[in-house]
Amino acid sequence: MSSVGELKARAESVFDTLAPLWPEAEPLLSYRDPFELVCAVALSAQCTDEQVNKATPGLFAAWPTPAAMARARVEEVEAAIHSLGFFRTKARHLVEAARILEARFGGKVPSTMGELLELPGVGRKTANLVLSACFGQPGIIVDTHVLRVCLRLGLGKKADASDMERRIAELVPAERWTRFSHAANRHGKFVCTARKPACVPLSALPPCPLLYLCPRAGL
């Protein structure tokens, strides 16, 4: 069993290796302001970023602000995002969130974790992404890719995003949280994939740059 010191050293090596390879510490979702990012991340559950980016231009053209979205009929929003999974639930959440933004926050996306979590469809992953991308705050963004990569690296043992967020907070300095999250996301999306990671024999992908330190937990 690795000690905390050993895991911190491994996490540091992961950062030092991946951060230069994936220098863009920003979302892959398209957005122009905090409201659009909140909506886009809420839509991304069980969908790819590419799918969301195809659906959001029409959505934001029709309802570009919380005030506009708050006045929308849920059925109209459903029609705009029907190409996405769970579109009925997501449409309801978007309209409810917009109404809360208008009623409680003056039509502005709040800049604190607690307030963001008051919005339907917003969990800690979404809140951390918004806080880091829109408000410059350190954020640990544990999506499915980050969770998978960190589990395989042995940085945590529970397949639980909240537990992994706590583990990363213990192992990575706060000033590196955002860059670590985005670099791990890209690594999981393009290299350490779910079904055929680059370390699997006969993989057509280039060798994984983390192979020298990864215990390949679960593989």
Image (cartoon, rainbow, N blue to C red):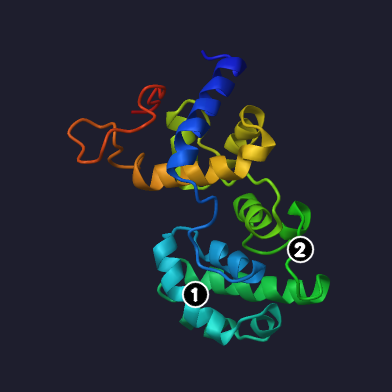
The residue that label 1 is drawn on is 56
Q: Quadrant of residue 163?
A: top right
Amino acid at pointer 1? Thr
Please tell me whether residue 155 is drawn above or below residue 83 in the rendered image: above
Which residue occupies 40% across, 67% down? 51
Which residue occupies 20% across, 41% down? 204
Q: Could you tell me residue 80's position as x and y percent? A: 48, 81
Which residue occupies 48% across, 71% down? 87
Please tell me whether residue 70 is drawn above or below residue 187 in the rendered image: below
Label 1 and label 2: CA atoms lie apart by 21 Å
Check disc 2 and report its element: helix, strand or loop: loop
Please tell me whether residue 149 is drawn above or below residue 215 in the rendered image: below
Check disc 1 and report its element: helix, strand or loop: helix
Q: Could you tell me residue 110's position as x and y percent? A: 76, 63
Residue 38 versus residue 187: which sits nearer the camera? 187
**One can see residue 5 in this view:** yes
Q: Quadrant of the C terminus?
A: top left
Image disc number at residue 110:
2
Which residue occupies 66% across, 67% down? 34
Residue 173 versus residue 4: which sits nearer the camera? 173
Drawn side of residue 119 relative to residue 11, left or right: right
Q: Could you tell me residue 117's position as x and y percent? A: 71, 56
Drawn side of residue 59 relative to residue 98, left or right: left
Residue 208 versus residue 123: which sits nearer the camera? 208
Q: Earlier in the sequence, mark 1 or mark 2?
A: 1
Q: Could you tell me residue 70's position as x and y percent? A: 68, 81
